[in-house]
Image (cartoon, rainbow, N blue to C red):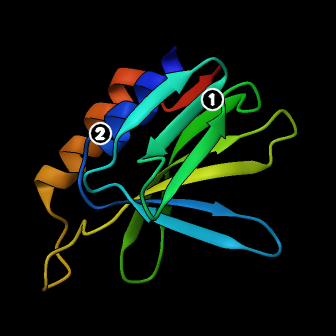
Amino acid sequence: MVLFELLSDIIANDDVLLVVKNHGVTSEIRSNSLNIREKEKWITIGDNDGPAHMHVNSELIKSAEFIQEIKPERTSFSVQFFDEYGERILAAFFTKMYDGSKKLITARKKTYDDLTQKFSPKIKF
């Protein structure tokens, strides 16, 4: 249930980019106006009949971590979800965190910090 609540809280925010990546394919879906629902082990993000959606097998996600990655021009903010082997299954990147002059938008950072505080920086499911 914590996984569903975390994903729900994440996609409730505009400008979050959900990324599924492996060695052959990268899929990206914006959070803006996405629905979320849970049926048995499957969490569906997006409209099942729409142009883009994903099905997350909740039994395979064993942990999540709030990650702030410092880069030369800015810091990226994400929540990353991992399987039992520590391999990333899904990442939610909080985008549009900076204004046109590359200054961190405090309201966006507060949203990220509030989620981190609510769920904990590292979560085991």
Residue 41, image x and y in percent? 67, 22
Name the residue at the front extreme. 49
Residue 30 lies in quadrant:
bottom left
Q: Is the residue under label 2 in contact with that under label 1 (CB below 8 Å)? A: no
Residue 72, image x and y in percent? 44, 82
Question: As rendered, which of 87 and 114 lies closer to the eye?
Answer: 87
Q: Is residue 105 left or right of residue 77?
A: left
Relative to 75, does residue 109 appear above or below in the rendering? above
Q: Is residue 33 left or right of residue 64?
A: left
> At x 80% / y 42%, what residue is drawn?
86
Residue 125, image x and y in percent? 65, 19
Q: Which residue is mark 1?
A: 42
Q: Residues within 10 Å of mark 1 (few under 14, many from 20)?
A: some
Q: Which residue is mark 2?
A: 113
Q: Earlier in the sequence, mark 1 or mark 2?
A: 1
Asked if one can make out residue 120 in the rendered structure from this viewpoint, the answer is no
Name the residue at the right extreme. 85
Question: As rendered, which of 78 and 21 lies closer to the eye?
Answer: 21
Amino acid residing under circle 1: Trp
Label 1: which secondary element:
strand
Relative to 18, does residue 85 appear above or below in the rendering? above
Amino acid residing under circle 2: Asp
Residue 120 marker: none
> At x 25% / y 69%, what residue is drawn?
96
Label 2: which secondary element:
helix
> At x 61% / y 43%, what residue is drawn?
55
Question: As rendered, which of 107 and 51 lies closer to the eye?
Answer: 51
> At x 41% / y 23%, what residue is drawn?
5
Q: Residues within 10 Å of mark 2 (few under 14, many from 20)?
A: some
Task: Give the label, 1 or 2, closer to the camera.
Answer: 1
